[in-house]
Structure formats: structure tokens, C-alpha cells
Amino acid sequence: MSNEIKYTFTPAFARAVVDLLGAACRPDPEFPAADVFSLYYDTPARDLLEEKRNSDYLKTKIRCRWYGAVRGTTMERAVFLEAKRKEGAARDKARVLLPLDGATLWNTPLTDPLLCRLPEHLAEAGIPFPRPIFPMFILRYTRHRFIDPATGARIAVDTGIHVPRANPAFIARHNPTPLPVAVLEVKGSLREMPRSLHAVSTFHFRRDTFSKYLACHDMLFCSTGIPGGYTCFAPAAPPRDHA
């Protein structure tokens, strides 16, 4: 298992942070910049989401992930089904290559039985997961990746985090408006920000256990206070006319 450290900061500083990292670090040789697509799965009661909300020591994420052009329409062919498990700050990820491409997944309705059956590929690989689980929504963001030359740590800056598509069987709306936050992630054996990143520490970073899935879910919903109970939350909706 490796460690994952997250920092959140104001999106207005994202361009400057990316430029400073480009001067201090090496670009990732495979994906220096790309849009990331993640289709998240959960139980109807949102059990996996509640693990994160309740800060459970053991957490699980099930998602399909693929990549595309930055703010474009071209998508990579490879789609991976991932089971990501965290034990405290340590993390472990297993993944399976799926027999469909990114464009096909993107254009398939989230209510389609094909997508509901995809997690069974984890079972075939001997990877356990909770049942039943269903597609909830697709999350999209732009990621810039770097390698810290001193420690080999992998560094990512994520911006434009939003929900372009949601499963209407569970979520009544999507929201293309990005979250008002950007994220810097450091993955490796470190437990603190690498020294080579001190140049970006002039910006206000907040060390956080930030979850994109949780934040985007709560942008769309608010809890009713009952386990598994959520009501649609639409702050951008116009006021209703009661006349």
C-alpha cells in the first residue's frame, strides 16, 4: 500500500500552481494532462459514500475510469473497473480492463443493464465488493500529473470537477457547474508535501481528506437524516411561483 495526501485550494490559483509544478517537477511520461472520467457505483443506501462521510477507517470505492482530451470530446479506448480500498492513509487499488471503450461507456445510458453488470468483472477476478451496487453518476475533471524528481512521488492537480451525467433512477439532476475547489494530490511513501513543492506553498493549501465523489454527491443532494435517505438539492433552480 502507498500513502495518498490531499490538499484543497482555490481554483483561481490552479494555473499558477500547474506552472510552478512544471518548473519544479517532471511531467508524467504517460498522462501529463488529460480529462479524467469516473463512473461511480454505490448501493441504493449509499453505503460506500457513508463510509467516507462517517470517516470510517476502512473505505471502499468502486468506479469505472477512462481518459480523454482536455476539455475535448476525444476519449481513450481503455476503460478500467477499479476497486479502491483505503485503510487510514494507506491505499490499495485493484483494477480490471473492461471489454468496452470510453466513447461507448460515455454514450450508454446509466440505467442500461450493461453498466449495472460491469462490477461482476471484479467478482470474476476474485475481488470482493458490496452488493447490490448501481451506477450513480459520471464525474469529470482535468488532471495535470507530475513526478517529484527528489522522491519519485506522483503529484496531480485536479480542476474543473463536475458531474456531466447522472443516473435518473437515483439522482434526479446533474450539474455541469464545477465545484468551487481544486485538489492537489501527492501519492507515494511520503506523509508530507515534498520539499520540491515548497514553491507552491505560498498559495493557501488546506490538507484535507477531500472526496470528489462525496463533494459532488452533496452538491446534488442533501441528507434527510435517515440512513440512505436523500432529497434533491437544487440551489440554482429558480424560486417557485406560489401565486
Image (spheres, grey):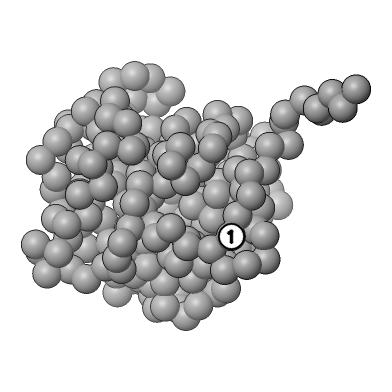
Seen from the viewer's position, the closer of residues 95 and 89 is: 95
Q: Is residue 99 visible?
A: yes
Name which residue lies at 70% across and 52% down. 204
Q: Is residue 200 above or below residue 69?
A: below
Seen from the viewer's position, the closer of residues 17 and 173 is: 173
Q: Is residue 187 above or below residue 237?
A: below
Secondary structure under the numbered disc 1 in the rendered image: loop
The 10 Å Cα crowd at callout 1, few under 14, some 14 to 19, many 20 or more, is few
Give percent across and percent down for residue 138: 41, 39
Seen from the viewer's position, the closer of residues 142 and 221 is: 221
The residue that disc 1 covers is 229
Tag 1: residue type?
A: Gly
| Left-right relation of 100 to 44 | left
Name which residue lies at 47% across and 31% down. 164
Name the image quarter holding the N terminus. Answer: bottom left
Q: Is residue 141 visible?
A: no
Name the image quarter holding the C terminus. Answer: top right
